Amino acid sequence: MHISSNDTSPFRQLEYPPKYPVVQQGDFSNEVFVNQEFKFIFFPIAKTACTEWVRFFMRLNNSPLWCSNGYEHGIHSIKHENIKFMSDYTLEEQTHMMTSKDWTRAIFVREPKKRVLSAFLDKSHNADWFRNFCPAYVSAGGDEKECIERRHDFDFFVKKMTVTLHDNAHWLPCYDYIDKKWWKYMTFISTMKNLSQDAEILLKSVKSSVDGVSAWDRIGKHGWGADFKKHGCEDSGDSRAFLEAKPTNHQTGASKTKAEKKFYTPELEKIVENRYAKDLHNPYFHFEEFKIFDNDDDSDVENIQ
């Protein structure tokens, strides 16, 4: 597999070998969005603007509910009525979609220290913690009292919650979302640092097989400025572009302030670096080095994989 000489470009120039791997059950650890008209496959990762991509695919599929929040568990509770998923296709069809040069396969990833902190600030401060995370933690052998009393303790979150519930999608390493054999077939890989700019570049490249219009021109370049918490879908005429203005009701502390030093310690930073080594050290993600503390001494830090 040949990779473009410009390794920092989100687009990857692929050469397609005569023999391909085949998709097997479990190759994708999360739901994968598909739009047949645009031959567009998107791999959403939790804490990488996933909710906004749900809205995008609902709107691309002409769902009138794409900007509604009138559901108990938010927009995610109705996405199955409005989005096609990879699992809707046979394994043979999935293999074709994953290896065909006619399909665009895209993903956004996020630097793990920022992503783990964002997951903590989001999930430990809302009802999901008591409704979902503590029961799951207890079922996996964790202590219920500790889960409740230490819900706002980042040290507990990193050392115990993310270890006991290691396969939870909100903090699962990005690299583990897709079986390793498929990363070299990804057409487009970008990071949260360049989210809005690269999303525009991506969507301008994805074009309808019906009329040739790009997904950006179809729905990406306008109508995304509405405050989804206050207005209905009929108020989507705002001129702002997709991801240009993130809805205020989905912001967390990690998106509003540089909070890393408030929560991390040198020990926790080393733990996250070790646990997310696959995200930090692979030929695909190209994260810029992000150090919270200048401390090279990791002799007393447990190497948790």
Image (tube, rainbow, N blue to C red):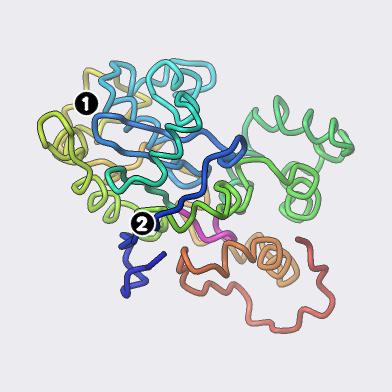
Q: Are marks 2 and 1 in contact (CB under 8 Å)?
A: no
Q: Is residue 304 left or right of residue 288?
A: right
Amino acid type of the residue tagged 1 in the rendering:
Ser
Q: Is residue 30 above or below residue 173?
A: above
Residue pictured at 45% horizontal, 35% vertical: 94
Circle 1 — which element? loop
- Quadrant occupied by the N terminus: bottom left
Measure how far apart labels 2 and 1 are at the Cα level: 41 Å
271 within the magenta span = no
**For the residues carrying marks 2 and 1, which lies nearer the camera in this image?**
2
- Image coordinates for residue 229, horizontal then vertical, percent: 38, 26
Circle 2 — which element? loop
> Which dot marks residue 202?
none
Residue pictured at 32% horizontal, 33% vertical: 56
Q: Residue furthest front?
A: 18
- Image coordinates for residue 222, horizontal then vertical, percent: 17, 36
- Image coordinates for residue 48, horizontal then vertical, percent: 46, 47
Tell me the residue that label 2 is attached to: 16
Q: Earlier in the sequence, mark 2 or mark 1?
A: 2
Residue 250 in view in this figure: no
- Quarter of the image for residue 273 reads bottom right
Main SS of residues in magenta: helix
Q: How many marks?
A: 2
Tell me the residue that label 1 is attached to: 236
Q: Specify start and end residues of the magenta stretch as a single range.
A: 109-117
Q: Which of 152/195 is in front? A: 195
Residue 172 in view in this figure: yes
111 within the magenta span = yes
